[in-house]
Amino acid sequence: MNLLPPKEKIENQRNYFYRFLAGLTGAVLASLLLGCGLLLPSYILIKAKQAELKANLVSLKNLRQADGGEKVYKILEAADQRVDFLLFQPAPSLTAAVKEILVRRPAGVKITGLTYHPQADAAGRSVAMALTGVAASREAIVAFVKELQTEPSFSSINVPVSSFAKGRNIEFSLTLVQNEK
Amino acid sequence: MKNNRSKIFLFVLVAAAAVTAAAAYVWFWRSASAANDETSYIRGDIESQLKKNEITGALEKLVNDTETARRQIDSYFVGADQTVDFVEYLESLARAAGVNFTIVSLGVDQAKDDFKDQIILRGEVTGNWSPTMNFLSFLENAPYRLDLADVAITKPEKVDWETKILIKAFQLKK
């Protein structure tokens, strides 16, 4: 039972409130200071570690730059380009084509000229060839064409009609396309 | 009354100290957190740099291991200063085949953004049929990447076979 006069009662309550508030604030302050105190070493350690890692990273980067890391990539890229270029096969062989033609040449046909013109298109690489020669008879030219048609790599074999105008010692021309096997 | 004032002053002082401490705590906490994040990123960067270095090391080994093969690849191209050697090589092939080989024109087509230029050589060959075929075969099997771009073989009356030939070779840039 509080027998104090009401004014003092109120004064006591106010004092209690101030003390409580001051104590609470003091406790908060103390815990914050404690927190700061505990965080500081962690912060310093993290900063030190960060500086060390940064230095490591820089030295790792410098190591490769000094070694010429970019140079290695350039060398390999150049080699790759060259291999790609060399892998692209040249046109079918001229001498092989000539052999194929001569093997199929019947008696009575003499070759006097040959042109070889490689060309590349969407279907691949091929060679446009033109032959000129002298045939003993029309039959010899026909037989020659038939023999050439048996070779699968030859296509579009054409003999102008004018080549059949004469009956003997015919100067003929013939065009064909040799495709890649 | 004076007692109350001093208590209030003390309270305000403690409260101000608490606010300052709170601000300092928040600052430390955020700084530590940011530093921690940055450290994690640096660790990631170091790991990727280590991997990159490892790959580069492996590539360096590959470059060393393939040096002979790369030289072999380069040998299919005419060297930057070896045009004369190349021409003399073609002439030696002609001599070996037993034909007369005359160079009509020789030029270099320089290509931009490419590792190579194109040597364009026009020549005339005269000789018997077999030597001519041998020479053409030598060209096809030469240890250079050569393209026989155009060949015309004719047999004029009473003389040897005549061959007009357009050769394309490839020269490494300096």
Image (spheres, helix red, strand yellow):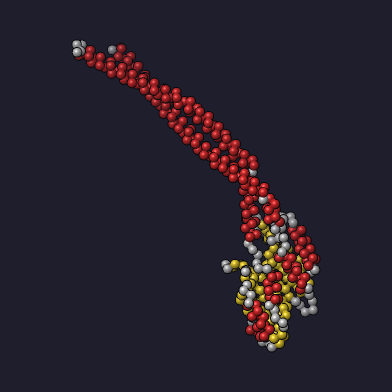
Q: Position of residue A167 (x, y in %)?
A: 69, 88
Q: Tell me which corner region of the image, top left, top right, bottom left or bottom right, holds residue B26.
A: top left
Q: Quadrant of the N terminus of chain A?
A: top left
Residue A70 shown left or right of residue B75 in the figure: left
Residue beneath the point at 30% across and 14% down = B4
Viewer-side residue, A55 vs A146: A146
Viewer-side residue, A140 vs B36: A140
Q: Position of residue A14 (x, y in %)?
A: 26, 17
Residue beneath the point at 70% across and 73% down = A99
Viewer-side residue, A179 vs A75: A179
Residue beneath the point at 65% across and 48% down = B63
Vertical comparison of A86 with A57: above or below: below
Q: Position of residue B84 (x, y in %)?
A: 76, 59
Q: Position of residue B111 (x, y in %)?
A: 65, 58
Residue beneath the point at 61% across and 39% down = A62
Vertical comparison of B57 with A99: above or below: above
Q: Tell me which corner region of the image, top left, top right, bottom left or bottom right, holds residue B169.
A: bottom right
